[in-house]
Image (spheres, rainbow, N blue to C red):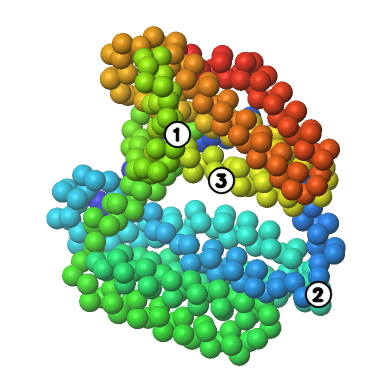
Amino acid sequence: MFNARELFRERLSEYVKETSRYLRYIFNGHLMITMFFFISVLAYYYQGWLTQLPNDFPAALVIGLGFGLIASYSPVRTLLQEPDLVFLIPAEHKMGPYFRNSLIYSFMIQLYLVFLVAAALGPLYFAAYPERTGKMYLLTVLVLLIFKLWNLFANWWMQKVREPGMRKADAAARTFLGIAVFYFAVNGDMLWAGITTVVYIIVFLYDYMVARQQPGIHWELLVEKDRNRMQAFYRIANMFADVPHLKNRVKKRQWLVNLVSNVPFARRHTFDYLYRITFVRSGDYLGMYVRLVIIGGLFIYLIPNLWLQVLFALLFLYLSCFQMMALYQHHRTMMWLDIYPVEVELRRQAVVKLLYQLTLGQVILFSLLFLAQQEYTGFVLTLVGGGLFTYLFMNGYVKKKITA
């Protein structure tokens, strides 16, 4: 006999086992040390910045944005799979307990985001409003939890709607209203906070009425959303370990392909061409590389201490190179590479050469950022230290890990 509660327990158990396998690789020693260093430095400078907080700093807007965005980000994890489109649709009328448990699970696993944001923005709140007590902030966090729960229900109801434009408009409206509510509440404008809350409740009730009018559950959308979330997790895990069931995304990016594909038409440059195109067209590597360059540049620009700036530059060089090493395994399931009339050693050399180019390009960008700030000592240290780090890291670590 079909048991929806037992099905959810089985799916949750499978999901926990699947994700825990890769989380062991993601949260390895390298990443934990890096995260601890980041958090320590950020906390130190954040505390120092709060002691000199300007009187006109828009603290209410920052806290309102943080709370409003966290409240609106309330996805429902149903843990549905593609075969369910065939086998579970006939039992849709018995799936109530399953989806009820999905909502409870989705709310519980998102609580850590609420508490992280509340802990991060708490010092800003008390620095901007020293006359307020801790009870006021706790009350604001409680309201955040209520809005988080409302958004979770609203998202679930709107997933029954077939029109994507209507779902996007509803999500945008609830996000804007949530930001407005928390902005007015933190700023002390309780009248406007109450008015925007009433408007939000009207939208919330409208979502419920629209969902009641839908013919049934939009199974294809639920399966697609869960599949996309798992693929996003697999793409992150693939940077640390092989994920055999990862579906690689490919993007055209023709102008970038034309820019990087200018290699000599010779057999020994076959893998040079392949990995350049892979770096540009894959949905993972180019975006991650650009994000790490931008984040590293922001750290260099914002941190006032020269030695910490140089240290962060080297740290982001390490992170970029370490993540881009996954390029070598990108085509591991493609048998065509094994029948290329090209020496296998050239494949390893092509990846190492590309990593050299990407890392040295990052060294130049970080050095120019020091130069733009007229930090000539930092410019020289980053240029020389980054070049030396690249050479030692490539020859001492990368070449040993990338085996042909």
Mark 3 residue type? Arg
Quadrant that contains the C terminus: top left
Indicate which disc, 1 or 2, sits on the residue closer to the N terminus: 2
Q: Is residue 358 left or right of residue 203?
A: right
How busy is the neighbourhood of tag 3: few (under 14 within 10 Å), some, or many (20 plus)?
few
Q: Which residue bears the numbered disc 3?
A: 291
Is residue 270 at least partly visible in the picture?
no
User: Disc 1 versus disc 2: distance between alpha carbons?
Assistant: 49 Å
Circle 3 SS class: helix
Indicate which disc, 1 or 3, sits on the residue closer to the N terminus: 1
Pointer 1 with pointer 3, Cβ within 8 A: no
User: Disc 1 versus disc 3: distance between alpha carbons?
Assistant: 19 Å
Relative image position of residue 213 (x, y in whole percent): 22, 76
112 in relation to 131, above or below:
above
| Observer-nearest of 14 and 234 | 234
| Observer-nearest of 20 and 365 | 365
Circle 2 SS class: loop
Mark 2 residue type? Asn
User: Disc 3 versus disc 2: distance between alpha carbons?
Assistant: 32 Å
How busy is the neighbourhood of tag 1: few (under 14 within 10 Å), some, or many (20 plus)?
few
Circle 1 SS class: helix
Q: Residue at x 34, y 76 (%)?
A: 207
Relative image position of residue 339 (x, y in whole percent): 28, 13
